[in-house]
Amino acid sequence: MKIGMIISTSDAETCWNALRYANFSLGQKDEVRVFLLGKGVEYQKTGTDKFNTSEQAEKFLKSGGKLYACGTCLKTRGQGASDMCPVSSMKDMDEIVKESDRVLTF
């Protein structure tokens, strides 16, 4: 199954759980793509020891997941691109939505 996820919150626990689910789905042999939108691009800054969002994102990427981040959202927050937050566009999000069997939002 193709799963698209849109994370638009910077809440550490919510991002952590979304990324844990993304990792679980990869383990189930699903194809998973995560698009970070709005406050979601801040997931690394808001992670905590208890809700280590960066650790979950690293595991996701190493397991073959694909991560995208809204370039405009990064720019408005003065953030640069990185492997953990690669610049993407609304076109990428549109493709994820259209090509996915299921789309989840957090």
Image: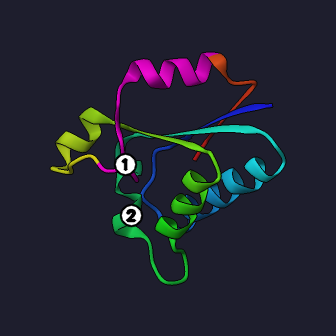
Percent across and percent down for residue 46 are 38, 68
The residue beneath circle 1 is 85
Residue that carries the numbered disc 2 in the rendered image: 44
Q: Which one is nearer the viewer's eye here, 35 or 9?
A: 35
Q: Position of residue 19 (x, y in %)?
A: 60, 56
Estimate the x, y position of residue 37 in percent, counting from the top left: 41, 40
Magenta segment, which residues? 82-98
Q: Secondary structure at mark 1?
A: loop
2 and 1 marks in contact (CB < 8 Å): yes
In magenta segment, residue 90? yes
In which quarter of the view is residue 18 placed?
bottom right
Task: Give 33 or 14, whichever is nearer the viewer.
Answer: 33
Dot 2 falls on a residue whose secondary structure is helix
Which of 38 and 33 lies nearest the eye of the viewer? Answer: 33
In the displayed structure, would residue 56 be above or below residue 24? Answer: below
The quarter in which the N terminus is drawn is top right
Taking the spot 67% from the left edge, 50% from the top edge, the residue there is 22
Q: Which of the labelled discs sits on residue 64, or is there none? A: none
Report whether 71 appears left or right of 4: left
The amino acid on which the numbered mark 1 sits, given as a three-letter code, is Cys
In magenta segment, residue 19: no
Please, is residue 44 above or below residue 69 in the view? below
Which residue ends up furthest to the right in the rendered image?
28
Instruction: Please name the residue shown 39% across and 22% down the image.
Output: 90
User: Does label 2 or label 1 sit earlier along the sequence?
Assistant: 2
